Each structure stands twice: as structure tokens, then as C-alpha cells.
Image (cartoon, rainbow, N blue to C red):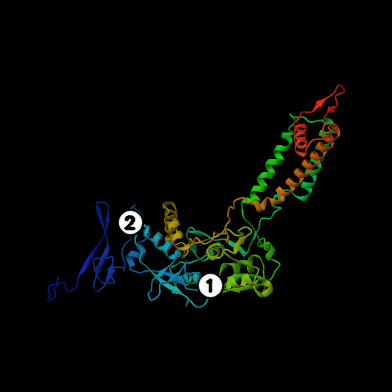
């Protein structure tokens, strides 16, 4: 052994051991001159470089997850897209190298739930002034520039062929957003539950029943209440339909969904979004028939202008972006059904163990409620609902029923008028002798008394007035 003047070993050499339970196993040596080697002789010609295989806990020679990052001291290089708009999802904190947003918070929260430490560093992709394409960002993983990708990355079949994705942390299928308007309640709203044919058949049915009842009864019947059993189902269905029309605000739009847009040229899409690829590759829509939209404000203006003024009839984009757009713009809404079922995930290299562990961590975030809390922090707004306009429940007002009241009142007035004319006729016919010399007040009292008398029948069964 040779020591240096300061008392340290001049040429230190160390034995490297593998601790297995309560025992040890020598796997090699390290010296300052020859580095790692397997033999006691540091001469490279007499021993091989490197170490013998390590036996890890569990009696396995497979390197545990997480050891790769913690042992080599290398940071996980995480690519983050920088683009115009979408600051609620991913954005750089001004004046720093830090990032914030919904996607960033979900990623860091999931990373903290891993059973091993993973040092990471966010690396921006793009200049924040142009539109970065997520497919280009994922390509950076395949060529070794990034070890992971975080952002509004939609999981698609083609993309799963080049990278591994985690469990989706948010659903974001494609939807159609268009201007909507409220169907205002009118005086004849009570007619909406039935079609004209239904009203005609119902009216004819009541006329037929009335004629039959008149033929069979022909006289006043105090116990007659009508065929209630036949009327019950119709009345219940009518009330249910009428309630849905009058109590829930009805929304209307000339655009009914993606089907009505396939033959038009006035549909928009957000630059750099997955919607463009889907429309051109899956639905075979030519790019010349699509209108690119750069920002939420441009989208709002184009929708308000409409096709007649150089705008668009609707925009097709991912639900997550559209819900954020609609949260402060109540005059627009989602029309039709969501026509794709997709989600966002974090991208990793193929066969990366981190993809599996991060998926487990995302499920834990969902189970303990942290995922929803992060969503509420960045994406929840209170101005409008996700459908663009509130589905308000209106209190029933007179203006929705005055037509019905007018019709009912008119019929009642006519019936009462006919009844009074009939009573006056019979009163004047049977009381001529008693009215001579009587005052107007006396005649009026006699008339009320006559009306109040119960009908009587003679021996022939005829009514005596």
C-alpha cells in the first residue's frame, strides 16, 4: 500500500459487493487507474471490464424501475408544447423556466405518487408564436430528444404505434359548437305536445263522444263524469310533454351535428388540433373546405358573423377546449353528439416502465379526488354551463297559457250565453202572467228563483220548466 503525502491512498482500489439478504456477493472491483473490472488484478489483460450481474431484491437480475434514473443522475427530459392559446392546459410562467396548467399539475401530482424518485426537467417545444403539431412533438421521443411528453396530447391509434401512452387523465372527444338561440315561449305553447293530426283526431274523438253522450243521455245526469279510464293515458302523456316544453329552456340551431357539416364549406377547426387530421384522414374532407381558427376571440367572431358574412357555421374541436370556450360564451353551445371517444395521455418511449407506473398513479389521483380538484382549479368556470347556454328551469308564466285561457273562456262564455238565452226564453214563456205590473228588480228576483228551481218531469217524462 502506498500513501500520498497527505495520508491518502496513492492508488485506491475498492471491492464492490452485492448484499443479498444477510449475505454478500462480490461482483467486481474499482480502481482509479483501471475503473470497474471483475478480477483482483487491475491489469486489463488479466480481467474483464465491468461487473458481474447484480441480484436485486426478489432474486431477480432485472433492474428495478426507477433505478435507471436515480442511479445515472440523469434528469427525465419532458417535452412541453408552447403554442398560442390554451394557457389553462400548458403555459410557461413568465420570466422563469417553470410551467403551469392543468396538464402540468396532473403530471407532477402523478409523478409524486411513484414509489421511487424521478428527477425531471421540462423542456419547451416551439416558440409560443407558431402552432406546434403534437405529432411532431411525439416524434421527438422516437429520436431520443425527449424521454416523455406532457400536454394536450390526444391518444390515437397511429400515435400508439410510435410511443406508449398512460391511462387517459381527461376525456376529450371531438364535438361541434355552433350559435344557438332560445325557443321563446308563446301564447300557443300548450299546442306543442301534440301534432296537428293528433289534435284533429283528439278533437274528432271528443265530438263523437259528445254526440254519443247526447244521444244516450239527452238529459242532465249529475253522476256522469265521462270515460275517465280512456282519458287518463292521453292526459298523462300530454302533461309530461307539455312540462318538458314549458319548464326547460329549448335551444335551437340550424346545425344539428357533424352530419350536417360534411357537405358544407363553412366549418372551422383550431390550428394544430387533432380535429384537422381526423376530418381529412378519417372523414375524407379536403383541407380546402376547412377554415383554420387561430384563437378563441377569432372563433367567437367567426361564429357570430356566420357563413353569410365570411364566418363559419360551426367549429369542430376537442371537448376540453370547447368546454373552456363555452364557459364564458353563453350564446354558443354543443350541438349533436360527441362523435369520437378519446382522451389525453402522457407519452413515453415504447416499453417504458414509467408509462405503466404513471397510469397507476393517475388512477390513484382519480380515486382520491385530486384529479377532480386539479380540474376544478384550472378548467371550471361559472358563467355558463358546458353546453354553452344554461338549461334554465323557468317558472310557468301566464304568457305561456293565455291562449289556452282565452280559448277556454270563450267556450265557457258562449255556453253560458246560450244557457242564459234559453233560460230567458223559457222564463218569459211561462211567467208572462206573473210579470204584469212588476218592477225590474222584482222581475230579476223572479228570474233568479226560476233558474234556481230544479227541473221536474210530467207524467209523460217531459221536463217542466
Classify 302 as above or below 19. below
- Residue found at x 70% / y 39%: 233
Image: 386 above or below 404: below
* Quarter of the figure with the N terminus: bottom left
Measured as percent of width and height from the top left, residue 382 is found at 50, 60
Q: Which mark is residue 256?
A: none
x then y, percent, for residue 442? 76, 35
Q: CA distance from mark 2 to mark 1?
A: 42 Å
Identify the image quadrant of residue 319. bottom right
Residues at marks 2 and 1 touching, judged by CB atoms closer than 8 Å: no
- Place of residue 202 in the rendered image (x, y in percent of width and height, measured from the top left): 78, 43
**Residue at the limit of the structure toward the right, as seen here:** 460
Towards the viewer: 143 or 376: 376
Rate crowding at label 1 as few (under 14), some (14 to 19) or many (20 or more) other CA atoms within 10 Å: some
The C terminus lies in which quarter of the figure?
Answer: top right
The residue at the far front in this view is: 437
In the image, 438: left or right of 193?
A: right
Task: Please state if 83 lies on the left or on the right of 2 as rendered.
Answer: right
Q: Residue at x 66, y 65 (%)?
A: 283
Residue 91 sits in quarter: bottom left
Determine the secondary structure under disc 2.
loop
Residue at numbered disc 2: 56
Judge from the rendering whether residue 218 lies leftward or rightward of residue 379; answer left or right.
right
- Residue 129 visible, this angle: yes
Q: Residue at x 72, y 41 (%)?
A: 234
Q: Residue at x 81, y 36 (%)?
A: 423
Q: Is residue 46 visible?
A: no
Name the one closer to the observer, 150 or 268: 268
For mark 1, what is the residue? Answer: 133
Amino acid at each position: 500500500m502506498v500513501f500520498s503525502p497527505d495520508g491518502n491512498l496513492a492508488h485506491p482500489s475498492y471491492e464492490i459487493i452485492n448484499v443479498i439478504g444477510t449475505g454478500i456477493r462480490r461482483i467486481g472491483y474499482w480502481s482509479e487507474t483501471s475503473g470497474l473490472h471483475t478480477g483482483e488484478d487491475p491489469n486489463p489483460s488479466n480481467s474483464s471490464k465491468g461487473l458481474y450481474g447484480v441480484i436485486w431484491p426478489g432474486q431477480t437480475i432485472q433492474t428495478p424501475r426507477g433505478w435507471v434514473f436515480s442511479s445515472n443522475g440523469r434528469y427525465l427530459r419532458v417535452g412541453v408544447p408552447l403554442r398560442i392559446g390554451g394557457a389553462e392546459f400548458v403555459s410557461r410562467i413568465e420570466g422563469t423556466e417553470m410551467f403551469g396548467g392543468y396538464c402540468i399539475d396532473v403530471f407532477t401530482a402523478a409523478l409524486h405518487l411513484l414509489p421511487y424518485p424521478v428527477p425531471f426537467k421540462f423542456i419547451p417545444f416551439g416558440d409560443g408564436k407558431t402552432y406546434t403539431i403534437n405529432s411532431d412533438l411525439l416524434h421527438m421521443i422516437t429520436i431520443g430528444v425527449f424521454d416523455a411528453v406532457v400536454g394536450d396530447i390526444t391518444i390515437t391509434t397511429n400515435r400508439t404505434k410510435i410511443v406508449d401512452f398512460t391511462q387517459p387523465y381527461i376525456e376529450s372527444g371531438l364535438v361541434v359548437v355552433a350559435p344557438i338561440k332560445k325557443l321563446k315561449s308563446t301564447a300557443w305553447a300548450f299546442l306543442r305536445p301534440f301534432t296537428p293530426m293528433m289534435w284533429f283526431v283528439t278533437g274528432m274523438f271528443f265530438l263523437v263522444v259528445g254526440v254519443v253522450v247526447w244521444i244516450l243521455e239527452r238529459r242532465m245526469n249529475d253522476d256522469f263524469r265521462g270515460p275517465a279510464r280512456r282519458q287518463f293515458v292521453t292526459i298523462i302523456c300530454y302533461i309530461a310533454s307539455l312540462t318538458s316544453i314549458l319548464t326547460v329552456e329549448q335551444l335551437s340551431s340550424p346545425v344539428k351535428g357533424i352530419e350536417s357539416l360534411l357537405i358544407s364549406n363553412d366549418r372551422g377547426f383550431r390550428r394544430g388540433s387533432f380535429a384537422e387530421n381526423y376530418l381529412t384522414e378519417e372523414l375524407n374532407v379536403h383541407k380546402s373546405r376547412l377554415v383554420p381558427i387561430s384563437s378563441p376571440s377569432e372563433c367567437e367572431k367567426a361564429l357570430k358573423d356566420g357563413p353569410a358574412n365570411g364566418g363559419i357555421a360551426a367549429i369542430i374541436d376537442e371537448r376540453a377546449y370547447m368546454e373552456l370556450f363555452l364557459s364564458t360564451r353563453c350564446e354558443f353551445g354543443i350541438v349533436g353528439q360527441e362523435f369520437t371517444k378519446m382522451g389525453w395521455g402522457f407519452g413515453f418511449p415504447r416499453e417504458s416502465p414509467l408509462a405503466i407506473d404513471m397510469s397507476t398513479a393517475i388512477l390513484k389521483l382519480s380515486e382520491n379526488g385530486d384529479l377532480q380538484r386539479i380540474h376544478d382549479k384550472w378548467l371550471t368556470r361559472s358563467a355558463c354551463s358546458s353546453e354553452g347556454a344554461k338549461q334554465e328551469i323557468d317558472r310557468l308564466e301566464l304568457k305561456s297559457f293565455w291562449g289556452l285561457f282565452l280559448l277556454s273562456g270563450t267556450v265557457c262564455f258562449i255556453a253560458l250565453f246560450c244557457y242564459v238565452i234559453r233560460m230567458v226564453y223559457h222564463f218569459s214563456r211561462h211567467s208572462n202572467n206573473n210579470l204584469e205590473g212588476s218592477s225590474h228588480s222584482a222581475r230579476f228576483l223572479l228570474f233568479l228563483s226560476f233558474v234556481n228551481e230544479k227541473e221536474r218531469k210530467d207524467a209523460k217524462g217531459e221536463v217542466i220548466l
